[in-house]
Amino acid sequence: MTCGGYRPESGKSPRTDPNCVAAVDPGGVVRLPGRAYGAQWTSCWYPGVDVDVNIEFERAAGHFADVARGRDWSTAVPTCPGRDVNRIVGHLGRLAAWTEILVSTNAAEPVEFDQAGLAPPEAPEDRQRWLDDKLAAAVKTFRATPDESPVWTLAPNGTARFWKRRVLHELVVHAVDIEIAYHLDITPIDAAVAQDGIDEFLDLLPHAPRLEGTVGSGSPARLALVGPGEQWHIDWVPPGFSWHRGHREESSDMRVAARSMQDLYLYAYGRPASRIETRGDHDALDRWRLATQL
């Protein structure tokens, strides 16, 4: 995810074919051929569940800012080794500012992430206000921009909704990181948001640089992620994979089941999760989780 510093690729990403979503079969299968990183993907972008991303983004932005407010930002974040709260906050503020620029300008090309004006202020007393301002600007722009508005994206999609979802789940997961760092109770995550987050996680996997050759020792493998009332099935056939959401009769080589959608969401994003049951090749599952930390 973002514990190493979320960085955009320098090149263009293809915009979604206008017929692409309609081409996804009724089971929601997304085919991802080719190498697991740096290839030209021919897949469609999975539309996700029916979540009002603007409302959820505003809620997540406010929660993230409040979790960090008035606390010691030099506190280490154990779920992001080598990082402290200050670095996580700086990353989210810059990401919000960067994506606000992309969306507000309908950027057709990537914008330099390190451009002037995105860095947090040096004075610690000014950083909370800076974070609040960057998040508020993103909330305002995202609300004013239709989901389908064209914009450059780092993966096949080409719409503002891509960035709304991407930053939403960054905020949700990193708020959990900060809560863990301060030994706070984890704030409940809405089940629909968690379900959308698992879809988004799988959408992004082709762009994870460590994915290739890590699952099943290079052999075909099947992984099932099972939550309350919903399932995700991943077919790993090196050097690519496909996935779909929905019930499947065939057995899987590996199975991860959670009693809540929140736990499955946190497991997928590599965070501590309770009430998880695993079955199958545990070494392969460990390799999967290591390889798929975006």
Image (spheres, rainbow, N blue to C red):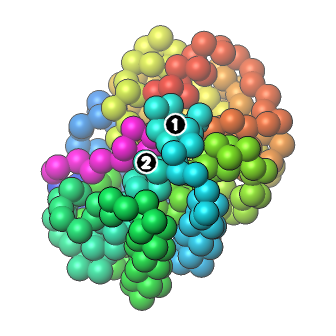
Disc with the residue nearer the chain's start (1 vs 2): 1
Residue 1, visible in the rendered structure = no
Q: Residues within 10 Å of mark 2 (few under 14, many from 20)?
A: some
Q: Is residue 38 above or below residue 59?
A: above
Q: Which residues are magenta?
A: 2-11
Task: Judge from the rendering whether residue 33 lies leftward or rightward of residue 85; answer left or right.
Answer: left
Give, as a three-letter code, the residue at label 2.
Arg
For this rendering, which residue is in front, 9 or 135? 135
On residue 87, the disc is 2
Q: Residue drawn at (33%, 63%), measured in percent from left and top?
A: 121
Task: Judge from the rendering whether residue 49 lies leftward or rightward of residue 9; answer left or right.
Answer: right
Residue 210: percent from left, percent from top: 38, 27
| Magenta: main secondary structure | loop
Q: Residue drawn at (60%, 13%), measured in percent from left and top?
A: 283
| Secondary element at image label 2 | helix
For this rendering, which residue is in front, 181 or 260? 181
Pick the quarter of the image with the C terminus: top left
Separation of marks 1 and 2 at Cα, in angstroms: 10 Å
Q: Is residue 285 above or below residue 41?
A: above
Q: How many marks?
A: 2
Q: Residue drawn at (21%, 56%), measured in percent from left and top?
A: 114
Residue 155: percent from left, percent from top: 32, 53
Q: Residues within 10 Å of mark 1 (few under 14, many from 20)?
A: some
Whether 6 is among the magenta residues is yes
On residue 80, the disc is 1
For this rendering, which residue is in front, 125 or 270? 125
Task: Judge from the rendering whether residue 34 lies leftward or rightward of residue 284; answer left or right.
Answer: left
| Secondary element at image label 1 | loop
Residue 118: percent from left, percent from top: 28, 64
Give, as a three-letter code, the residue at label 1.
Cys
